[in-house]
Image: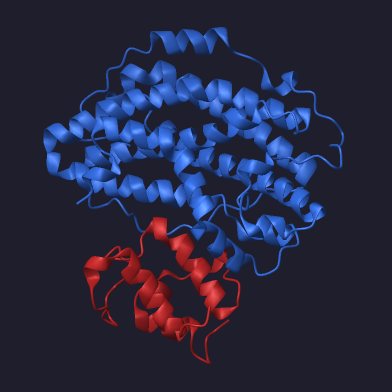
Chain colours: A blue, B red
Amino acid sequence: MVVRGVEPVVLDLGRLENLAESGYYNPYSMFDWPDVIEPDLPWMSESLTTLAGTPMWDELSREQQVALTRFEAINFFSLNIHGIRELMSEVVMRIHERTYAGVSEFLHHFIGEENEHMWFFAQFCLRYGGKLYPAQPALKAGSVDHLSPVARELIVFARILIFEEIVDYYNAHMATDASLPAIAREINRVHHQDESRHVAFGRMIFTNLLGQVAERDAGEVPVIAEYLESYLQYSIATLYNPQAYRDAGIADALGVRRRALAHPVRRAAHDEVLKRTRKFLSRAGVGREVIK
Amino acid sequence: MSVEPMQAVREFIVGRNPQLGELSEELDLIDSRAIDSLAFVEFIFLLEELTGQAIDPEDLDLDDFRTLRTLQLRFFTKEAAW
């Protein structure tokens, strides 16, 4: 693929590359996978489930609550896997292109680490949940085809960054949640550790490409801000998987999903998850306040 | 949900695209980006809730989603091909 109309991306990535090298580990041998997980433990922090803080959570039996943490953990890890599949394919198609030649060294670390993350998420899902949830249905028609080439490049890396920042909110919390099984805590901890580098890189490349967009046509910035806000909302909604509700024995899964997404406590929780990312976007000049 | 199904479909689309105002039966919802890839999943869930039927993501025909008329024909007529 040839990226036209985009200047070469030049970033100082020496520190991140050194950290990637010094922190390198073998994911295939570092985890201690138990044969089974303790039957009464939640797999996801209860406060991070999609019904937390609502009457719908209180109405569940304890068995259903624990089941929901388990199926939402499988959903969360499945979303990670599908998100990694998407971002890896985008990055693989760009590495060593002229625009990205200067950052290819870091992109090699990035692709390698993401592949390893995908492996340990899939291990957890398949060993203990017996399945992955499928990717969300996608519309092939592009929703950014009307944007300039450089803005489309920005959107590719913005989607990666937003996905990683949202996931990291959950990982950071669960890395230290003593109520979880050790293996769940450990996967979240290791992912959180690697993602701090990926988020740092993501913010740098986002800033570079946004600068190129603004220089070419500042009028495109509010359009991008609108897309990014929609993408934030979309990403949050993917955590509310009706199939996870059904698997946990919850009736009227679609109605529960609709009510939960609109519940004021959940809306406040979404704002908390997105706070750091929204602050970054606003500081960069592409926050939701610039949408026309 | 007790709203008339096609009214709920209209409200979903206009709610996300207030600039559209009155929705024409023949507006191409995909080409006009009234339903884009970020809205599509929510739209599928809405249709599933309104029809009470699961929609197989592996078996989607984009043309069924192009206009209000095709949506009505595909999902809300007695002859709807489930």
x then y, percent, for residue A245: 68, 59
Question: Left of A182 or right of it: where is B48?
Answer: left
Residue lying at 57% horizontally and 25% vertically, measured from the top left: A192
Tell me the quarter of the picture where residue A154 sits: top left
Quarter of the image for the C terminus of chain B: give it. bottom right
x then y, percent, for residue A234: 44, 52
Q: Nearer the viewer, residue A76 or A14?
A: A76
Number of numbered callouts drawn: 0
x then y, percent, for residue B1: 53, 78
Q: Is residue B70 in view from this perspective?
A: yes
Q: Nearer the viewer, residue A229 or A4?
A: A229
Q: Is residue A140 in view from this perspective?
A: no
Residue lying at 85% horizontally and 42% vertically, measured from the top left: A40
Q: Nearer the viewer, residue A136 or B18?
A: B18
Q: Please determine whether, in this image, residue A60 is positioned above or below residue A103.
A: below
Q: Please determine whether, in this image, residue A21 is positioned above or below residue A212.
A: above
x then y, percent, for residue A178: 74, 28
Q: Please determine whether, in this image, residue B4 is positioned above or below residue A289.
A: below
Residue lying at 47% horizontally and 20% vertically, measured from the top left: A197
- Taking the view exactly as shown, the residue that stands out farthest to the bottom is B78
Residue lying at 76% horizontally and 46% vertically, measured from the top left: A129
Tell me the quarter of the picture where residue B12 sits: bottom left
Q: Please determine whether, in this image, residue A87 is positioned above or below residue B8.
A: above
